[in-house]
Structures are given as structure tokens and as C-alpha cells.
Image: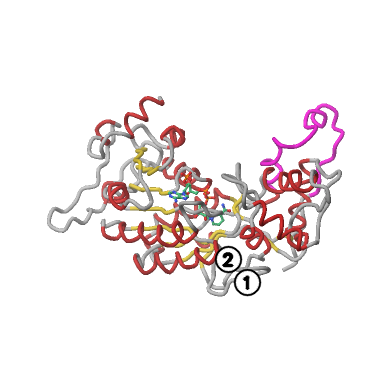
Amino acid sequence: AKATINNISRQTWNQLPKAAGCIVIQQRDASSNVPTKLTAMKRGTGGRSSFSGVVATVFGANGFLGRYVCNKLGKIGSQVIIPYRCDANEVERLRLVGDLGQVLFFPFQLRDEESIRKTVQYSNVVINLIGREYETKNFKYSDVHVAGARRLARIAKESGVQTFVHVSHLNAKKDIQKVWKTSEFLKTKYESELAVREEFPEAIIFKPSDMFGAEDQFLNYFNYYSRWTVFGQFIPWKSGLPIWKNGEYTIKQPVYVADVAEGIIKAILNPDMAGQTIQCVGPQRYYLADIVDYVISILRREEGLVRTNRTFWIRLRAALLDYIPSRPWYNPDKLEREALTDWTVPGMLTLEDLGVTLTPFDDMAKFLLHPYRQYAYYQEKMGEFADPEPPKPAEF
Ligand code: NDP
């Protein structure tokens, strides 16, 4: 299988559909070069082997949200084009999201317009899920979020794409609150919304709060727990789990990743959603302190856990952790994002308006964290440990 995907991904675009047994190619009006309506070519009963009328290019498909979006697109019988910049083997697993020949891969670079143009030329939907939680040597926040998103929106418009979906962040606003220094991530995410609207006015913008799910960066074992073990347990002054003000003043409204993916699918199938901005939040609000307590108690790692209220040490550690290459657990920007309370804008559309039934946090959290808990064997065999109570929702 690896050999096949490598061979296919290295062929030219024109050879791809034939090689992969592709059954749907977008047709163009020769005079205007505008794609004809693929929706007219819909067929089947709506399952995996039907054709939904959607040929979607999904940028950032191998990311956390991307996997769910591609899966849902494949399930309704869409053709999915997956541009990737990594090794082809890393995106290989996504081939299974759709029917045979309906998932196509193409190498691209965010700064290479020609490669982007080739990946969107036959699509009627383009979904931009590209984002980065930390800056790298090659890409600053503004390169990825603003310049990159603007480029994708412009090329999509020029190529005659009908629907462009962009994902920003709930707390990306004109006036961003701050506890230390303004988050560059949120600032550039807000600028990305303006850039996308400028290039593609009918774009649909999604603004999710922190998303939780399998392998997320919110609930995950590697988020709170490793932040504490690496920099709380082993350093001499034992300054504890770095969370701004212990999370006692921060309220979060996390949303389940599959709900956001479902919202994206519903929005691209609904022509009334053109030009709309949709906020994605979960059904309940919680104090961050309660979420952290719950996570740690499910993992059964309470003993020895020290919290800190010393903002100087938190800032210092965030700054130091930023230097860890390739996988920063914590950095000043994350500190800032994590410390902000999630607020929705009254009157703006939400996932519920799209008909998505929201998944409660406490239904999923225990299930997601279960593989990481200590003494799981003893509990199952001897029933020794009681399960912790889920956190109580915040009062407002
Ligand atoms: P991930 O970090 O899991 O995935 C990001 C994707 O963007 C990856 O496919 C990555 O590709 C790609 N990417 C990053 N930088 C570049 C670049 N310079 N050139 C090309 N591709 C790049 O993100 P999520 O799936 O978690 O999030 C999807 C979107 O939602 C992002 O825009 C994110 O900012 C936003 N968001 C996420 C939230 C969350 O809780 N996760 C909350 C709110 C908004 P590669 O694998 O090759 O690096």
C-alpha cells in the first residue's frame, strides 16, 4: 500500500484521476473557465459510494480537525483532495476515509501558488484548516494564518471555487483581552478572517473554542500532566503545574471536535450559509481549575500535584518551554490563550443553528482519558477506585 500511495502521489495531476480510478472530474465551461455545478451530478442514496456533489480540497487534512472533516466528507460520498507537505506515508491513513479512488493526494507548499492552484482547480469546495499553535523558523504566525489563508482564498476565488471554509478561533476578536501580553496567535487569526473576507466575501468562517477529542491538545494527558511532571516534579523549587491563577478565574466552553466537523459539512451543503460566521462552543461552561482537577483525578495522578499561583515562575517557565524544539508543551502565547475566558457574541450563528447536537464534555472526557489512567487493571478487577465526579458547570 505504501508503494502505491507514493507512486500515485508523485504522478502529475492529469494522470491522477485515471490512476486512482477516480469517477468524478469537475467539468468546465470552455469559454469562461468557470466550473459547472457539480451538485447537478449528485447520485446515489447518500452513503459512502454515492456522490454528494462535493469535490473538496481540504488543506490541513492530516491535522486534528482535518481527520474528522475528511471522514465525514467521505461518509456522504464526496471526492476529497488532500494536499500535503509531509512524507506521503503520513497522510496514507486518510485514503480509507472515502470510497475507492475518491481520496486523492497531492504534494503542495503554502508559499507555492502553482501547487495550490493545481489542488483546487477541480474542486467546488475548499476547506482551510491550516493553523499553527507555535512559530517555527520558517513560518511565523502571520505567514501561516494571514498570508497563507489570504493566498488560499484568492486562488480559490480565481479558480471558480463556490464554497470556501476558513477556521479561525472563538477568542480572535478586534479587541483581544490579555492577562500578560496580547496573543499573537489570536491577533493573526482575527487578521486572517479579514483577509479571507476581502479575497472571498462568501467564505464561511468557523470560530471554535478549545476542541477536545482523541489526540487533542486540550484534555490530553500530554498537556496538563506532562507540563506538571516535566517542570513541576523534577525542578528544585517545585513550583507546580503552570496554569495562570490556577485556572480559578478562567471559564472555558470546550467543544467536541466531531461536532465542529459536522458543522462544517452541514454548512457546505447549505447554500444559505454563504458569508456567515459560525461560533463553535460546547453545551456547558466550566472553570478551567475544575477541568484540570477532573483530568488529573481521572488519571489518578493527584498525589504530589502542586499548583502554583506565582505568576513570575509561570511566565519564566512558559518562556523557557518555548525553546523546546518541535513540540512546545507551553509557551507565552499558549499561557495567554489558556488564561482567556471564552465569550460568545450574542446573535452570531452557533453550531446548534446548523442543526448539530452538541456532545457534552463530561460524556466524552472520561472515555478519552481512560487509556492513560493509572491502576486501570486493579479497578477493573477489584473495583477499588471510585470514579471522580465530573466538574459542575460554571454558573454563568
Ligand atoms: P493541527 O495543528 O492539528 O493541524 C494543523 C494543520 O495545518 C496540519 O495539517 C499542518 O500540516 C498544517 N500546517 C501548519 N502549518 C503549515 C504550513 N506552514 N504549511 C502547510 N501546512 C501547515 O490543527 P487543528 O486540526 O487542531 O486545528 C485546525 C484549525 O482550527 C487550525 O487553524 C487551528 O488554528 C484552529 N483551531 C484549533 C483549535 C483546537 O483546539 N485545536 C481551537 C480553535 C481553532 P503538517 O502536519 O504538515 O504540519
- Disc 2 marks a residue whose amino acid type is Asn
Can you say whether 3 is above or below 390 in the image? Answer: above
* Label 1 packing within 10 angstroms: few (<14), some (14-19), many (20+): some
Main SS of the magenta part reads helix
Along the line of sight, the residue nearer the viewer: 186 or 294: 186
Along the line of sight, the residue nearer the viewer: 165 or 267: 165
Q: Locate residue 203, reporting x and y percent.
A: 39, 63
Residue at the image position 27 percent from the left and 41 percent from the top: 24
How far apart marks 1 and 2 lie (CA) works out to 9 Å
Q: Earlier in the sequence, mark 1 or mark 2?
A: 2
Q: Identify the element where label 2 is drawn.
A: loop
Image quarter of the C terminus = bottom right
Residue position for label 1:
177
* Label 2 packing within 10 angstroms: few (<14), some (14-19), many (20+): many
Residue position for label 2:
171
Residue 381 belongs to magenta span: yes
Q: Is residue 351 left or right of residue 121?
A: right
Q: Locate residue 171, reporting x and y percent.
A: 58, 65
Residue at the image position 58 percent from the left and 71 percent from the top: 176
Residue at the image position 45 percent from the left and 66 percent from the top: 193
Q: Are marks 1 and 2 in contact (CB under 8 Å)?
A: yes
Q: Is residue 101 left or right of residue 373?
A: left
Q: Nearer the viewer, mark 1 or mark 2?
A: 1
- Disc 1 marks a residue whose amino acid type is Gln
Along the line of sight, the residue nearer the viewer: 271 or 299: 299
Colour scheme employed for the rendering of this structure: secondary structure
> Magenta residues?
363-389
Along the line of sight, the residue nearer the viewer: 104 or 266: 104
Q: Locate residue 65, reporting x and y percent.
A: 51, 48
